[in-house]
Image (cartoon, helix red, strand yellow):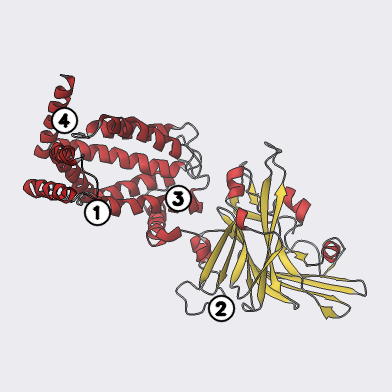
C-alpha cells in the first residue's frame, strides 16, 4: 500500500493527510507487505511481482487480490474495501505445499509523525480478553511475538491508528516492530518508528484492518471479535483517557456537544465549558478558601505552641500534649484543619482529567482560536503560559499569609508560579486556556472572599504582623 489518504484530515501543509510514512516505508516496508520469521523469505515476498486480479480505478465496495508463484513459493493476498476505515485482509503463503507463518503488517509509523513529540507518542497497543496493553517505544522489542488471545492489535500515535482485528482471536499472534529513522535535526538522536504484524502461526490469516482516526464516534462503529456481551465491544479503548476516564470521557463528549450545538469553535467551547465547571465547583472553592483564611487566623497561636514544644524530641510524651493544645485551639475557634483538603481533592481530578482529555481529543488537532492555530499544540507566543504565571502571582498577593514563614511566602509567590509556567509552556494551548481561565475565576472568588468579615480580619492580622516585623 503506497498511499493511504484520509480525506477528512489534513497534514501540516493543509493537504489531505497520507498515513503512510513515505521515508520509513521505503526503508522498512510498505503497509500490507508480509512479515515472516525467515528474513530471506520476507525480502523475497515483498520484492517479487504479483499478478493483480484487476487494475485501474475502482470505487468501494470492491475486492482486489494479488497472486505469486514460482513453483516452490505460492502467495495470495486479498483485500476487500467498503466505505469505512476498515478493510478485510486475507493472506496465505505456502512453501512446497505447506502453509507457513506470514503476517500482514503495518511496518513503520504514520505520515503525521513529523517531530520528536509525535514520534514519542507512538505505541504498540493490543487487547487480550479484557486487558489492554499499551507499550511505549522503550518497551517495544523489535521482532518479539505476543501470542493470543488477541482481540485487536496494532500501532498507534497520538491521533491515528492501524489496528488488526483477527477473526480467530485465540490463535492470533502479534509481532512487534521497532526501527530507527534518521533525524534531520540531530543525527546523533535518531527517531524510532513502530510497526505491527498480526496473523495466525502456521495458518492463513483472516482479519480486518482499521486504519484511521482515533475518533470515538468512528471507533464505536467497529465491532471486535471475542468480546460479545461486553459494555465496550468495539475499538473505543484505542482512545486512552487514562485512569480518570470516567471523568475525562464525559468531559470530552460534553465539549464536543458544546462545539456542535452552541459555539462552533473549539477554543470558545473550552472557555464556555471551563466557566460552567468553575461555577459548579465554586461552592467547594469558597469552602477551601474560607478554610484557608480561618487557618491563617489561628496560625500565630499554633506557631507559638509549636515553639514552646520544639525542644522536645518526636518520641517525647510531651509532644502529645502539644497536639492536644493545638486541637484545643482549633476547637475554640471552630476551625477544621481538614476542611480545606476535601474541596481540593475533588477539584484536582477535573484538572488531571481535562489534561488527559485534551491530549487525546483528535478534534482539537489544528483547531484555531484567536491567535492560536492549533489548540492541541503549545501557544506559539506563550501568551497563555505568561498569563498563567501572572495570575498565580496575583492570586498569591491577594491571599493573606498570616503565620507563614517568609521563605515559604517567597516560594509561594514567586517560585511556584514560575515553575508552573515552565511546566505549562509546552503543554497544549487548550489546557493552558482551561487553566488560565480557571485562575481568572479563582482571582474573582478570592476578591469576594477578601471582602467578607473573615477575609478582612485576616488582612488586618497580616498587616499587624508585617508592622511588628518592620520594628
Mark before the other along the chain sequence, 4 or 2: 2
**Residue nearest the viewer, comparing 65 with 59:** 65
> Which of labels 1 and 3 is toward the front?
1
Residues packed near mark 2 inside 10 Å, few (<14), some (14 to 19) or many (20 plus): many
Earlier along the polypeptide chain: callout 1 or callout 4?
A: 1
Query: Which residue is farthest left?
Result: 332
- Check contact, mark 2 vs mark 1: CB within 8 A: no
Binning the other alpha carbons within 10 Å of mark 4 as few (below 14), some (14 to 19) or many (20 upward) gives: some
Left or right? Give the position of 348 relative to 101.
left
> Can residue 265 be seen at all in this image of the molecule?
no
SS type, badge 3: helix
Tell me which label, 2 or 1, sits earlier in the chain.
2
- Front: mark 3 or 4: 4
Q: Which mark is residue 342?
A: 1
Q: Secondary structure at mark 2?
A: loop
- Per the model, the C-alpha gap separating discs 2 and 3 is 31 Å
Q: Earlier in the sequence, mark 3 or mark 4?
A: 3
354 in relation to 52, above or below? above
Q: Would residue 122 be found to the left or right of residue 450 on screen?
A: right
Residue 226 got which mark? 2
Q: Residue at x 42, y 44 (%)?
A: 431
Q: Which residue is mark 4?
A: 462
Circles 3 and 4: CB atoms closer than 8 Å: no
Identify the mark nearer the N-term, 1 or 3. 1
The span from disc 1 to disc 3 (Cα, nearest Å) is 25 Å
Q: Which mark lies nearer to you, 4 or 2?
A: 4
Query: How much space separates mark 1 and mark 4, taking CA atoms?
Result: 26 Å
Horizontal arrangement in the rendering, residue 265 relative to residue 228 (left or right)? left
Residue that carries the numbered disc 3 in the rendered image: 358
Question: Could you classify mark 1 by the number of other residues whose Cα lies within 10 Å: few (under 14), some (14-19), or many (20 or more)?
Answer: few
Q: CA distance from mark 4 to mark 2?
A: 65 Å
Amino acid at each position: 500500500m503506497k498511499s493511504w489518504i484520509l480525506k477528512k484530515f489534513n497534514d501540516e501543509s493543509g493537504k489531505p493527510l497520507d498515513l503512510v510514512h513515505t521515508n520509513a516505508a521505503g526503508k522498512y516496508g510498505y503497509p500490507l507487505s508480509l512479515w515472516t520469521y525467515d528474513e530471506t523469505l520476507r525480502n523475497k515476498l515483498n520484492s517479487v511481482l504479483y499478478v493483480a486480479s484487476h487494475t485501474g480505478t475502482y470505487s468501494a465496495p470492491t475486492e482486489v487480490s494479488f497472486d505469486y508463484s514460482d513453483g516452490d513459493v505460492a502467495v495470495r493476498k486479498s483485500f476487500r474495501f467498503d466505505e469505512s476505515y476498515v478493510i478485510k485482509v486475507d493472506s496465505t503463503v505456502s512453501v512446497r505445499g505447506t502453509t507457513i507463518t506470514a503476517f500482514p503488517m503495518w511496518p513503520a509509523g504514520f505520515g503525521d509523525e513529523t517531530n520528536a513529540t509525535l514520534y514519542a507518542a507512538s505505541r504498540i497497543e493490543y487487547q487480550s480478553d479484557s486487558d489492554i496493553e499499551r507499550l511505549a517505544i522503550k518497551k517495544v522489542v523489535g521482532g518479539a511475538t505476543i501470542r493470543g488471545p488477541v482481540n485487536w492489535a496494532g500501532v498507534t500515535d497520538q491521533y491515528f491508528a492501524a489496528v488488526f482485528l483477527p477473526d480467530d482471536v485465540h490463535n492470533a499472534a502479534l509481532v512487534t516492530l521497532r526501527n530507527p529513522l534518521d533525524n534531520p535535526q540531530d543525527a546523533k538522536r535518531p527517531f524510532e518508528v513502530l510497526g505491527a504484524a498480526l496473523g495466525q502461526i502456521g495458518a492463513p490469516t483472516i482479519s480486518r484492518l482499521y486504519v484511521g482516526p482515533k475518533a470515538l464516534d468512528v471507533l464505536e462503529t467497529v465491532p471486535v471479535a471475542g468480546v460479545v456481551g461486553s459494555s465496550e465491544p468495539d475499538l473505543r479503548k484505542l482512545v486512552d483517557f487514562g485512569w480518570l476516564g470516567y471523568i475525562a470521557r464525559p468531559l470530552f463528549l460534553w465539549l464536543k456537544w458544546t462545539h456542535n450545538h452552541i459555539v462552533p469553535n473549539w477554543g470558545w467551547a473550552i472557555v464556555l465549558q471551563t466557566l460552567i465547571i468553575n461555577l459548579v465547583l465554586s461552592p467547594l472553592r469558597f469552602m477551601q478558601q474560607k478554610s484557608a483564611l480561618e487557618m491563617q487566623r489561628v496560625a500565630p497561636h499554633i506557631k507559638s505552641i509549636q515553639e514552646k514544644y520544639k525542644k522536645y524530641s518526636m518520641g517525647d510524651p510531651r509532644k502529645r500534649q502539644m497536639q492536644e493544645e493545638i486541637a484545643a485551639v482549633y476547637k475554640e475557634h471552630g476551625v477544621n484543619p481538614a476542611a480545606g483538603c476535601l474541596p481540593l481533592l475533588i477539584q484536582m481530578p477535573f484538572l488531571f482529567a481535562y489534561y488527559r482529555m485534551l491530549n487525546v481529543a483528535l478534534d482539537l488537532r489544528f483547531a484555531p482560536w484567536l491567535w492560536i492555530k492549533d489548540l492541541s499544540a503549545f501557544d506559539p507566543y506563550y501568551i497563555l503560559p505568561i498569563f498563567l504565571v501572572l495570575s498565580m502571582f496575583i492570586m498569591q498577593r491577594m491571599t493573606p499569609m498570616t503565620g507563614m514563614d517568609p521563605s515559604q511566602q517567597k516560594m509561594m509567590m514567586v517560585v511556584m508560579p514560575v515553575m508552573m509556567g515552565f511546566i505549562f509552556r509546552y503543554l497544549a494551548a487548550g489546557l493552558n486556556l482551561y487553566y488560565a481561565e480557571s485562575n481568572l475565576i479563582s482571582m474573582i472568588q478570592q476578591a469576594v472572599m477578601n471582602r467578607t468579615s473573615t477575609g478582612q480580619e485576616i488582612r488586618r492580622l497580616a498587616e499587624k504582623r508585617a508592622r511588628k516585623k518592620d520594628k
